[in-house]
Structure formats: C-alpha cells, structure tokens
Image: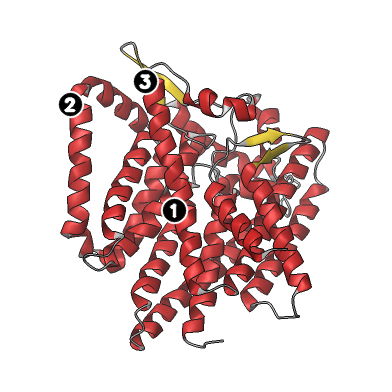
Amino acid sequence: MSSRLTAALFLATLFCLSFEKIQWELAGTIGLSGILAALFVLTFGANRLSAAPRGVPRTVAIVLLFGLLFLVVYLGGFFNIETEQAAGQFAKGLARFAITFAFAAAGIAYLARRPTGFYWIALGVLCAGIAFNAVYGIAQLAFAESGRNLDQTVLGPLLGEARPINFYGAVEGADVYRPNALTNDPNHLGIVLLLPLLILTPLYLRLERGHRLKLPLAVLLPLLLLVELATLSRSGLLGLAVGTLILLVPYRRRFVSAAVLGPLGGLALVLAWVVSRRVEFFETVVRSRLDTEADSTAVHFDVYELIGPALDGHALFGLGLNTFSVYYEAVTGLTNWGPHSFYAALVIETGIVGAALFGLFLLWVFRRLQAGHRLGRALAAMRDPVAARVRPLAWGLTAAIVGVMAANAFYLTMQQSYFYALTMLALALPVVFGRRLVPD
C-alpha cells in the first residue's frame, strides 16, 4: 500500500472525526470517519506486513493490552443481555469500540514512525476539522435565522435526509436555535470544541511575537469561543471552565496579557453589540439555561439514581455495552433520552469491573502526559527550542482531557472517536518527542 495513501487516510480521519451527521444506514449506521479510520488501519497494517520486521513502541503494546481487557469485560457483560434489541445495540457498540480503539493504537504506532513535524500536522488537521465544524455552525445558524435549512441544502443530496439545527424554543414569537453544525447535538459540538480551545490556547500563549501563527490563532480562538457560547451547552461550558483552571496553573500571568485580553475584548464587543439589539430575548434564553429546577436539568442528575437498580444482579460486568438506552426505555418509557452521563452509562453497561478498568486506563493516560511534562522540562534543560512547544502542548492535552471528562459528567461523548483521537495524541507525545533525547 502507498505510504501517501496511508498518510492521507490518517489525516482525513482526524479532519472528519467530529462530522457525526455524515453517516449512512447500510447494514447499520456507518459514519464517514469510521469508514476512513477502518481504511487507515487496514492500509497501515498492510504496510507493516510488507515492511521489514520491526518492534512496536511499548505504549502501543499497552494500548493493545487495554483493548484486549476491555473486550473481555464487554464479552462478560454480553451474557447479561436479555433482549434482541439489547443484543443489536451491543453489536453496534462493539463495532464502534473496535474501530476507534484500533485507530488509536495504529495511530500511535504510525506517528512513532513519522518525523516529529508530522505530529504537528496531525494535531493541526484535527483542530482544523473541528474549526470547520464551528464555521459550518455559524452558517447553519445564519440560515436558520433567515428561515432556511442549510443542512438539507448541503447534506440532503449526499445523505438523503440530514438532521437540522436544534430548535430550542421561542421567546416572544422569535425562534431560538442552538447550532449543532455537523454533529448530532449542540452539546456534542460544545464538548468537541474543547479540543482546539484548550489545546491551542497554551501554544498560542507561548508563540513568539511576530510568529506567523500568532494572528490566525488570535482570530480563531475567539471565534471558536463564540460558537461555544452559541451552543448554549452547559456541559461544554463546564468542561471549558475546568480546563481553563488547569491552564491557569502554569499560565495565569499570561492570561492577563495583551495577547489574551485583546482578542477577548474584541469578542466582548461583538457580544455586547448582538445582545444590545435584543436584550430581553437573550436574558430569557440565558435564564432558561441557568434554571436548575427545569426538567432538562433534573434528568442529568436523575440518571445517577438508575445505577443501583440497574446493577442489581449484574454488578460485575453490567447490563452490556451500549445497552443503556434499552434499559432506560424499559424503566421510564421514554425513547428520546439517552444516558445523560458517560459515567452513569459506563457503570451501568460495564459494571464495577468495566468502570475500574476504564479508570485505570485514564490513570495511565495521565501518567504518560506526566512523562510528556517531564520530557518538556528535559528538552528545556538541553536548550532544545522544541521545548517551547512540547511543554504547552502537554498542558493543553492535559486540560483538554480533564475538560472533556468534566463535561461528560452530564453528557455522553467520551465513547466517540474524537476522544480516542485525543488520547492517541496524548499517548504519542512522549513517544514522538522522546526521540529528541534518544535519536534513532
């Protein structure tokens, strides 16, 4: 297989990871990113088989070991499944896990064999794809305000039918929309936006004056923050707040510099102008999102009350991977609500053993990020100029993972491809840049 084809598939997968809407119903739901990820794994595997024998990084071996352990846990939960509907959901969840986890493992091995510059390209492509999603969300909102459907116009010919922008309600006869862009939900968009916001911010803060990326990032980051606010996603804003607190540890002084206050001031002026035109409208919308007694808020907390009854008799391995919606429908009779907490779904679907294993996996990811921080300090001691990029990158990846974890306390996105791509970049960081200390 051509190495160029492998690189193209890898980068295309990263760019399209947040494009949830682009999917087809062919013997199940098949998404564009899933197709690209599977093709990358196949081409990368074919290239490895045709190349001279060569070992794999220890990080990849541990990822594969975790993947095997997760599979054992999931198969243990399979024997607790009681209905055909749950079995179908289990099969979908297992296929999604296989593709995303295989992509993460193959991606680390692939990055380990490429020049360090390719890592930056991969990171840039991932952030560019999410930024494209944000721009699409702005256009989607503009079309909706004018009474048109951008999704049906752009995606309709490709998909047949595309999920439209989220309609939140009406205030004094004016419709309120929450952009979901190319994701399936405005909260999904709000959470995936955490990646570029939290990863790129420390890199931006450490760029030298006059660097060619300084101005583009000064424009891009406020734009992404504007879309984050437009989603009205409380989960997204919670993740952003927690991630920002992480970044304040090393960069608290830089957060009050002109590099930050200038772009934020420009964003504040734009928001002030928009809000001043419809003060009562925005006041009502914001108040509705801050209402902690509303039904939409209560459901995020009530889901945790289901853990105890769900695990009765199935405490070790849970009810089965991806079967929460089946259980939820049987208990409440509601078909339009998914698990509004990744952690509740994790415990209910995979039991105590599955939750403990996932916690161990996250602990290991943070240990590797800690190694990335140590690597940055070691490179700085060697006066390696790359240290000025590696250290903020390690902080940005740490903030992004913690932010996403916080956001998923009240939403479910950590089983999606974007999270495994994020962990892939985190785990690959010490592998790729560690070569600066011990060259091949």
In the image, 212 versus 165, the foreground residue is 212
Image position, residue 423 (x, y; %): 54, 61
Q: Indicate the quadrant containing the C terminus: top left, top right, bottom left or bottom right.
A: bottom right
Quadrant of the image occupied by residue 39: bottom right
Label of residue 276 in the image:
2
> Contact (CB < 8 A) between labels 2 and 3?
no
- Of labels 2 and 1, earlier in sequence is 1
Give the amino acid type for the residue marked by disc 2 in the picture. Answer: Ser
- The mark nearer the N terminus, 1 or 3, is 3
Mark-to-mark CA distance, 2 and 1: 31 Å
Q: Amino acid at mark 3?
A: Glu
Mark 3, residue position: 145
Visible residue check, residue 328: yes
Please name the residue shown 35% across and 61% down the image.
246
Q: Are marks 2 and 1 in contact (CB under 8 Å)?
A: no
Question: Which residue is pictured at 37% across the width and 41% down the height?
Answer: 228
Q: Is residue 347 visible?
A: no
